Image: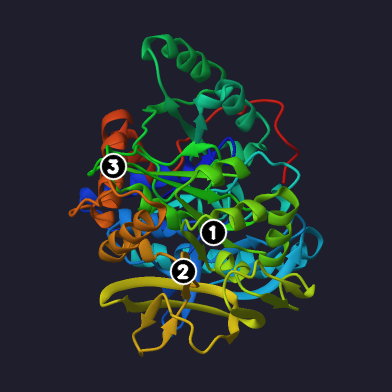
Amino acid sequence: MSGGLLVAGTTSDAGKSVLTAGICRWLHRRGVKVAPFKAQNMSNNSAVVVGPDGRGGEIGRAQAMQAAACGLAPDLRFNPVLLKPGSDLASQVVLLGEAVDTVTAGTFRDLRPRLSQTAYAALAELREAYDVVICEGAGSPAEINLRAGDYVNLGLARHAGLPTIVVGDIDRGGVFASMFGTVALLDPADQALVAGFVINKFRGDLGLLRPGLDMLRQVTGRPTYGVLPWSLDLWLDAEDSLAYGRVLGRPAAPYGTEWLDVAVVRLPRISNATDVEALATEPGVRVRLTVEPAELAAADLVVLPGSKSTVADLAWLRETGLADAVLAHVGAGKPLLGICGGFQMLGRAVHDPVESGQGSVPGLGLLPIEITFDPRKTVRQAVGTADGVPVRGYEIHHGYVSSADPDLTPLLTDANGAGEGAVVGAVHGTHWHGTFESDGFRRRFLTEAARLAGRRGFRVAPDTSFAAARERSLDLLGDLVEEHLDTAALWRLVETGPPANLPFIPPGAPTA
């Protein structure tokens, strides 16, 4: 068979990514050869994939997570178009893993035909190779101002004949209005593809919700395929919902006698913030994203994460007082970690004619290095060690270390024996993302961070496995789909396509 389904949403962060992953895991456990697909993603959270030519390329991190739900290695075709915002007005365009252009809203229109053709071709290849492809939409399918050029929501569904379900986040409120309005704003041909709805993040008495589901069916002629409950255990690989002021995950009680508090600066153009999720899987480690200088003062470990615009976010650190808080934290002898863009900020100077075009700007001066940006982007998987402990990660950056103190101690050693990153006292930095998913390295780093912070009672657990935690999360998604959705009805959609004679809901948009 060559079945398919599009998971659309009433809004961004409605639950499309997790529902797609849950359906993929459910099908995979049934023995179905299933793959994920998102024609176009806009995110600075990406994963490195080795392409057919052996070179590294980027796809959205959510699609890498969905691939794992399918029991697959990530494939560049799973997310053929990735837009990485560098500012409010411009985004880098990554096409089949390779950065090809930087566009504004105006110039994007000229590139869109090429992008849509690439996306359609990738989906066609996947449908030949797999029994089922579960597609994820982007934003809302009812963005009628963008419908004419759409190739990721109902433009994709229309092109490929995909039945579509719409997921809404009831925790935000207004979910019935959002679902009805989503359908009612579509033209007749698009409405004919929308088969029904899924409610996400419900908590409370389902009996109180059922009358609303019945009325929604009466006014739209479409069923709700199920209601997914709120789950605090679904937080790994969070693409859109890493909100400052919130502790990640559900921290387990300390293995030792003390907690370790980690403050991660939520930069305006934060990139691959999911690096710190692995820290949050450790018992006794509280990880919080923040924009408050006071929270940095109270933290044991401060992390400056990746950034899609290093120079602009460095200026923001200074404007907000966070740079002073970082310097005070280091002055107190407590540990600091910079990852990728955060690492670049720690040097003496950043020379950037590429991303920001601002030339040379002073860094925070905490490491004896200088960074220079190159138009060529480094995108590769990385393997190495840290004091003999195996480490895996990946690199995605334009900047490179162009000058360094020859006696500088590296944080890591790559597979060729070359040093990577830097350590000076309590200050650590690396271009490698994903290193904390290596259990041994994570334990080693946290042990050293606790020592530097004076948390003598903190101990790392000897058996925490990040890979196992991710698998538990994916299995939980599959369980939620099996237990709370009408999987028989979903399977009929996958097998037979959109139901016939779905009613039109006025007013509808003008015919596209």
Amino acid under disc 3: Gly
Res 475 → quadrant:
top left
Q: Position of residue 333 (x, y in %)?
A: 48, 58
**Neighbour tally class for label 3: few under 14, some 14-19, many 20 plus, Cα within 10 Å:** many
The x and y percentages for residue 112 are: 70, 64
Residue at the outermost left position? 463
Query: At which x and y percent is residue 478?
Result: 28, 42
Can see residue 421? yes
Residue 330 numbered tag = 1
Tell us which disc is closer to us: 1 or 3: 1
Instruction: Estimate how packed mark 1 is, as few (under 14), some (14 to 19) or many (20 or more) residues with alpha carbons within 10 Å.
Output: some
Which structural element holds mark 3?
helix
Query: Cα distance, mark 2 to mark 3?
Result: 45 Å
Depicted 412 relative to depicted 216: above or below: below
Please tell me whether residue 423 is drawn above or below residue 20 in the rendered image: below
- Of residues 272 and 426, the one nearer the viewer is 426
